[in-house]
Image (tube, rainbow, N blue to C red):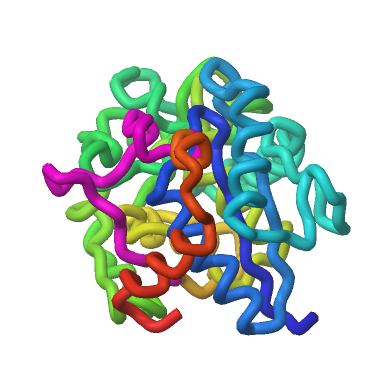
Amino acid sequence: MNDYRGRLAPSPTGFLHLGHARTFWIAHQRTRAAGGALVFRNEDLDGQRCRPEFVRAMLDDLRWLGLTWDEGPDVGGPYGPYLQSERHSFYLDAWQRLRDGGFIYPCTCSRNDLERALEAPHEEDDELRYPGSCRNKIGESKDWSAPAGVSWRFQVPDGETIAFDDRCCGTQQFTAGHDFSDFLVWRRDDIPAYQLAVIVDDAAMRISEVVRGTDLLKSAARQILLLRALGYRPPGYFHCPLLRDEHNMRLAKRHDSLSLRALRAQGINPAELCTKFAQEVDCRI
């Protein structure tokens, strides 16, 4: 194994669909081509929506597709636990460091996007723009010994351009305060938001490249700010093209007929699916 470390990070809130399959297949291909290690991480923070049957299905379906991993909840590894629901202490440590550094503040004025804070903010449901009503509470952050009870937002450096070179999409630029505003890092019910949890885990598990869909390009800019605040080096990014339905909408877990579980029941050959993925990807794997 070399220093390349990739990851598969599904959330067990439904059955995986073709879009997930292609993204994970690309991640698998890139890791194996680099001779690196592939990590499987179960992103099960959303206790209300995650279900055991979805956990079993995502493991079975990805193995059916021919994917293998070197570390994960089912095979172990040196950087566990590999379930986010068991990693609360990691997230709490990061929250404390952000609090002590003056990067975050308690927010009590909005509940609109709390339910979505556990999920990756995709293109059509990106985080709602926050007007900054609680920014004046930045000085109160050190008064809190624990995050529970309020929401916590990261104060972005307004006007700063966050740029990075994506290995599929090329150079990307987003302006803090314009393209995205102060974003959630912790929910008032004491659960870390997606943006914080994913960068803490990627850093702790030494992920060198993050492969995911282009709907998360803007999330990379947010996460780069968090990584900088915590003193972590950003991984490489490879945002691959999305699969879309006949209405040009990205595939989602509501597309039951395109779930891997449904395709397996229809007798679809997984090798043929992988061949199709290779033909469709229009950037270098």
User: Which residue is painted at 59% across and 28% down in the image?
Assistant: 54
Can residue 27 be seen at all in this image of the molecule? Answer: yes
Can residue 143 be seen at all in this image of the molecule? Answer: no
Residue 83 point in image, percent of width and height: 72, 39
Magenta-colored span: 238-261
Residue 127 point in image, percent of width and height: 29, 38
Quadrant containing the C terminus is bottom left
Q: Quadrant location of residue 7? A: bottom right
Give the vertical position of 256 relative to 283 (above or below): above
User: Which residue is painted at 65% across and 46% down in the image?
Assistant: 94
Say if the magenta span includes residue 19: no
Camera-side residue: 177 or 170? 170
Left or right for 79, reference 136? right
Left or right for 244, reference 33? left
Residue 227 point in image, percent of width and height: 54, 61
Camera-side residue: 39 or 88? 39
**Farthest left residue?**
247
Camera-side residue: 136 or 263? 263
Give the vertical position of 277 relative to 179 (above or below): below
Camera-side residue: 13 or 147? 13
User: Which residue is painted at 53% across and 56% down in the image?
Assistant: 270
Residue 183 point in image, percent of width and height: 37, 41
Q: Quadrant location of residue 33? A: bottom right
User: Which residue is painted at 63% across and 24% down in the image?
Assistant: 53
